[in-house]
Amino acid sequence: MSCLAVRDGRVAAVGDEGEVRALQGPGTRVVRLEGRAVVPGLADAHLHILGYALSLDRLALQGARSLAEIRQALATAAARLAPGEWIVGRGWDQDQLAERRLPARQDLDEVCPHHPVFLQRTCNHIAVVNSAALRAAGIDRHSPDPPGGRIDRDPVTGEPTGILRENAVDLVARLIPPVTPARRKELLARALREAVRYGLTQLHTDDCLYAGGLDVAEALFRELIGPEAIPIRITQAIPAEWLAEAAAAGIRTGAGDEWYRWGHVKLYADGSLGGRTAALLEPYADDPSTRGIYIHEREAFIDLVAEAHRLGNQVGCHAIGDGAAALFLDAVAESQRRHPRADARHRMIHCQILSEPLMARMAALGVVGDIQPVFLNTDGHWYVDRVGPERAATSYAWRSMMRHGIALCGGSDCPIEPLNPWYGVHVAVHRQDLTGVPEGGWYPEQRLTPEEALGLYTAGPAYAGFQESFRGRLLPGMAADLAVLDRDPFACDPAELKDVRSTLTMVGGVIAHES
């Protein structure tokens, strides 16, 4: 294929120049590629674009390499605020800190005794807060752990350390003053424009909880997206907490239109590997005292999945550990036993720690693997220590998942990782971090080819979203969602994949970005 024609928001023809040029009319705009490549518009299969937008106004701690750097950032922020104002940030990772430990409230109290402080770990499943925030939330040594969460306590005194895990994070997070609607809209528009600059044309996002309601989320996005606004397609997850409300409002998987539609029902089975709250079948190799945290009791979890399935929804479950993966697959099997339904395409989100038997069960149940290859950029440096070499051999195991016949789609989980999808493509191909470490890659037999890696962000999300007949490929009649790239990702030096950029992004025949 050397030419492509677009008409009325769809691909009109693909082929050689002679046959496609016959469709050219007096008002046709012709874009000469001059060595550039055209690929289907990219999609991010799992992220939180509103969450990312809101994080742009918060203290960024991704680059912190010591507790002293975190304290300095807090001191600088506090100097600009009146006493009592909140300081909110995210991005710290204890494995990147010189001290190699979790921060504690005392670390924050040293520089911020008069401001409530809330700092989320890079995974968003753990937060550290200071004494002022604990007081504001009424958390003390007598406070019980909430279901599906944990308040870390000093082993001698029983006093809270300031570390909150999983559902305990919400005890403080719910007290943070919200941004104004005008500022929220401004930040979201900024994030959406950044997305189309990368060649992203569709986002499978999970933002209703950030927005504060199903209707609030839809109204916010519809105000900003579309052919006359920011041309980008949104598929919005339905929080499992609001399943009954969604059903009453006629909201379920697939409802909506070409620009804004409802996706899977989202729920959590466990936490994060970096925070050791991912649920494992066997203890952590580097901390045998724990197997992680299950967010729900087993029977309640299975009933919730089965109800979402009964209502005709796709279910998307956050499951990082092999224990969480096994639980979700049990729930899918039980849902089909109670309410048989063909082609449900339930999605396991993250599915980082697996085994060959779990992969075989995924394939047999038709469960889609919703993976984030860019996680390995960070996790590669410590995940073997976390789970041990035996489990690591079948972890982040994308080639093995393909071999089992599991349909895969790729995302960033932004703001957990950067929005740029080419980082995910690069890591999927190299199995290295973005600096080229380690030489040869982590478990290099799990590498994907550039074609397979790009498919994670094109045909993969289209299939996962039941839209394979509408988008994800450049074929006549399909949506004219495409990206013109500054180099050919299949012919360039593979070391350059992380540097690929879109010089023109088109969504539904409308140019969303051009440089």
Image (tube, rainbow, N blue to C red):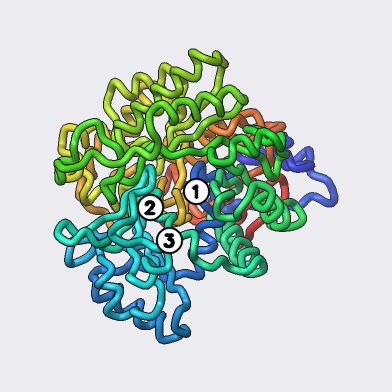
Element assignment for label 2: helix
Residue at horizontal 30 percent and vertical 73 percent from the top? 108
- Identify the image quadrant of residue 301: top left
| Residue 7 appears in the figure | yes
Number of other residues with Cα within 10 Å of mark 1, as a class: few under 14, some 14 to 19, many 20 or more: many
Element assignment for label 3: helix
The percent coordinates of residue 250 (x first, y second) are 71, 34
Quadrant containing the N terminus in the rendered view: top right
- Identify the image quadrant of residue 261: top right
The percent coordinates of residue 256 (x first, y second) are 71, 38
Number of other residues with Cα within 10 Å of mark 2, as a class: few under 14, some 14 to 19, many 20 or more: many
Q: Which residue is mark 3?
A: 172
Residue at horizontal 32 percent and vertical 55 percent from the top? 434
Question: Which amino acid, mark 1?
Answer: Leu
Question: Which amino acid, mark 2?
Answer: Ala
Mark 1–mark 2 distance (CA, rounded to whole Å): 22 Å
Q: How many marks?
A: 3
291 or 175, which is in the foreground? 175
Question: Which amino acid, mark 3?
Answer: Val
Q: Which residue is mark 1?
A: 47
162 or 496, which is in the foreground? 162
Tell me if 110 is positioned left or right of 266 in this view: left
Q: Which residue is mark 2?
A: 168
- Of pointers 3 and 1, the one earlier in the residue sequence: 1
The percent coordinates of residue 139 (x first, y second) are 36, 61
The percent coordinates of residue 403 (x first, y second) are 35, 23
| Residue 14 appears in the figure | no
